[in-house]
Amino acid sequence: MAASGSEFDLIARYFTRPAPPGTLGVGDDCALFAVDPECVLATSTDLLIEGVHFFSDVDPVGLGHKSLAVNLSDLAAMGARPLGCLLGLALPSVSESWLSAFAKGFHALADTSGCPLLGGDTTRSLAGHTISVTVFGQVPVATALRRAAARPGDDIWLTGTLGAPDIALRILQGRLSADPTVLQATRPFLDRPQPPLAFAAELPGKAHAALDISDGLLQDLGHILKASECGARLVYQCLPVHPSLSTLPEPVVRQAVLSGGDVYQLCFTAAPAQAASLLALARRYGVQLTRVGCITPEPGLVIEYNGQIMPWSGPGGFDHFSASATGAVPLPSP
């Protein structure tokens, strides 16, 4: 059903909520919010485009959730606590049911993450839905996590599991045939990522370098190594593979785990002395945490796979402007 009323009616109906105390939200030309004196502002923005980042028939409740989640994972990668967000929507048409469902998913995550919607914009699109979210957070100035902060000898840690979103995407695109139960088990990880926000906000002072896995483990870890001017050694058998992938052929699993994107979990480094503290922190927040390798002083990334040491030559991940969405992972079959 088409919605009636102006752009401002739509904003008031679906996206206006009371702002937190001390904050000026939707309704003025700018949002206003404060940052703690000992913190710096962390901000990030992402676009989601119909046909590129989501299917046209995707559940709008899940899309509302994911639109915010992929941005919140960037705050998590810096160890920042959310303060608020802005939402831009370009709509080919206006549907009451679509907007209501999208807003439901968006506001639900905004409430649970402490990241209220403070403003934004709506406009008409000539080619599908486009969604832009900008998030704001704060992090202590001296301990913000940065890609350039990895140190030789650091452990490499991952939260959550790998592979499920990539498998779900490939099944939906018709590039992979699998038992329907595999899609049922993996699709929630594609449609509703759950970045470990509360856990991540405790990492400043404990971890050194971090990022979120959006384009594939190997490609994203490569950003840390380049920025930190060091190398890494990963142990493939330590990687946290999602259990629903157990029935798939090993080469398919390997590709999904090493190069599959849309994970929105953390990859971070920390001194070995922090291991017990990090594992205790993960237990406190119910986060799966796995040590998967270490940072080395020598440049380059190598993978220990079935007792063999294999160099990785990249890119092995998603790139919007590459000829293909994924790169081959040059590892031997078992």
Image: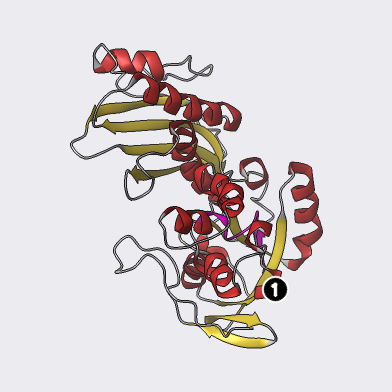
Q: Residue at point 39% right, 45% down?
A: 54
Q: Residue at point 60% right, 66% down?
A: 248
User: Mark 1 — residue?
Assistant: 237
Instruction: Choose between 81 and 217: the one closer to the eye.
Output: 217
Whether residue 144 is visible here, answered yes or no, is no
Q: Quadrant of residue 246?
A: bottom right
Query: Within 10 angstroms of label 1, few (less than 14), some, or many (20 or more) residues?
Result: few
Q: Residue at point 45% right, 72% down?
A: 316
Residue 180 in the figure: left or right of residue 41: right
Question: Where does the image place residue 271, in percent across and percent down from the top left?
Answer: 71, 66
Magenta residue check for 146? no
Whether residue 36 is visible here, answered yes or no, is yes
Region of the chain picked out in magenta, as a range = 155-165
Image quadrant containing the C terminus: bottom right
160 over 9 or under it: above or below:
below
**Amino acid type of the residue that numbered disc 1 sits on in the rendered structure:** Gln
Give the secondary structure at mark 1.
helix
Residue 290 in the figure: left or right of residue 35: right
Image quadrant containing the N terminus: top left
Question: Where does the image place residue 317, in percent across and percent down from the top left?
Answer: 44, 67
Q: Quadrant of residue 207?
A: bottom right
Magenta residue check for 157? yes
